[in-house]
Amino acid sequence: MSRMTADLTRTTKPGGAISRRRLLATGCSDAFRPPVIRGGLIGAADVLTMSTTRWLLTDQPLAREYTRADIAPDFPTWGQTNPSDEVYQQHLSEGFANWSLSVGGLVERPRWFSLDELKRLASRTQITAHVCEQGWSAIGEWTGAPLAQVLEAAGGVTPDARYVVFESADGWYESIDMFEVVHPQTILAYRLNGDDLPVGNGAPLRLRVERQCGYKNIKFVSAIRVVDSVAGIRRGTGGLSSDFGFHWYGGV
Ligand SMILES: Nc1nc2c(c(=O)[nH]1)N[C@H]1C(S)=C(S)[C@@H](COP(=O)(O)O)O[C@H]1N2
Ligand SMILES: [Mo]
């Protein structure tokens, strides 16, 4: 984690305000409270306003996007590449035709999404650099449904929503805060470089959070849950990586 530690020296921006990276990277995730979204649902306009505001206020622009010419010929696979979980293997053998994503917790209408339903939502395609904390990076083109769209299709989040928690078929779990949730590049990706997501890269669905390190980009996502606190989840830090000592906000 040495390069993330080095980032801690960049603590202030020109205006003198303490950057959010520092707040979070020093383990102060409790000190950081995203604004409560009033009025029940996150409307499209709210999402836009909120992400614009956050961008202006906290100096968190889009992650850099590249061109097709920059795409790595072979995007690596890393960590788990084929979960042995029985249910997962069944879905894999059926080409994920009967797979569905559970969306629950603090949403107005908890529901399931088939892969086709996710693909029918508005999509976003982005060519970005994946940066693994273990010393490699690769550029790939990801296509998926913006997470904000998915939550919208579940009726929007309730006023006390603060985090989205992701569960994976291999037992991995992670969470991100509502700021990251509504960021335009936060997508649930089902395609890599124009093809269905390969198994090794997290088929049928993986998270892309382009401003955070590899380990936050959880693969084989099977369920997402909106919560007001991550304290009750496993060891209580909000993710497998952070439960084992990595920063919860794994800024690149
Ligand atoms: N469920 C799950 N998600 C995961 C992992 C994993 O082992 N299991 N590895 C993480 C790490 S450390 C990295 S670098 C990326 C690797 O993504 P890739 O296999 O598409 O290269 O996935 C992340 N998400
Ligand atoms: Mo990684």
Image (spheres, rainbow, N blue to C red):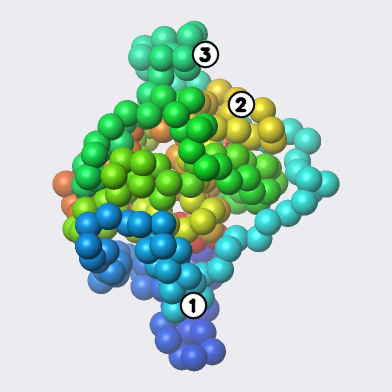
Q: Given the image, on which type of amino acid does mark 2 rest? A: Asp
Relative to 189, does residue 134 appear above or below in the rendering? below
Q: Given the image, on which type of amino acid does mark 1 rest? A: Leu
Report the residue marked by disc 1: 56
**Mark 2 in CB contact with mark 3 (< 8 angstroms):** no
Distance between the alpha carbons at the discs numbered 1 and 2: 35 Å
- Residue nearest the viewer, comparing 65 with 123: 123
Circle 3 — which element?
Answer: loop
Q: Position of residue 98 (x, y in %)?
A: 41, 14
Report the residue marked by disc 2: 196
Q: Given the image, on which type of amino acid does mark 3 rest? A: Gly
Report the residue marked by disc 3: 95
Residue in the picture at 60% in, 60% down: 63
Q: Nearer the N terminus, badge 3 or badge 1?
A: 1
Distance between the alpha carbons at the discs numbered 2 and 3: 10 Å
Q: Residue furthest left?
A: 232
- Residue nearest the viewer, comparing 82 with 70: 70
Residue in the picture at 31% in, 40% down: 154
- Residue nearest the viewer, comparing 99 with 72: 99
Residue in the picture at 24% in, 36% down: 110
Q: Is residue 17 left or right of residue 197?
A: left
The tag on residue 188 is none
Distance between the alpha carbons at the discs numbered 3 and 1: 42 Å
- Residue nearest the viewer, comparing 141 with 114: 114
| Residue 71 visible from this viewpoint | yes
**Mark 3 in CB contact with mark 1 (< 8 angstroms):** no
Question: Callout 3: 10 Å neighbours few (<14), some, many (20+)?
Answer: few
Q: Quadrant of the C terminus?
A: bottom right
Q: Position of residue 86 (x, y in %)?
A: 36, 12
Q: Residue furthest right?
A: 69
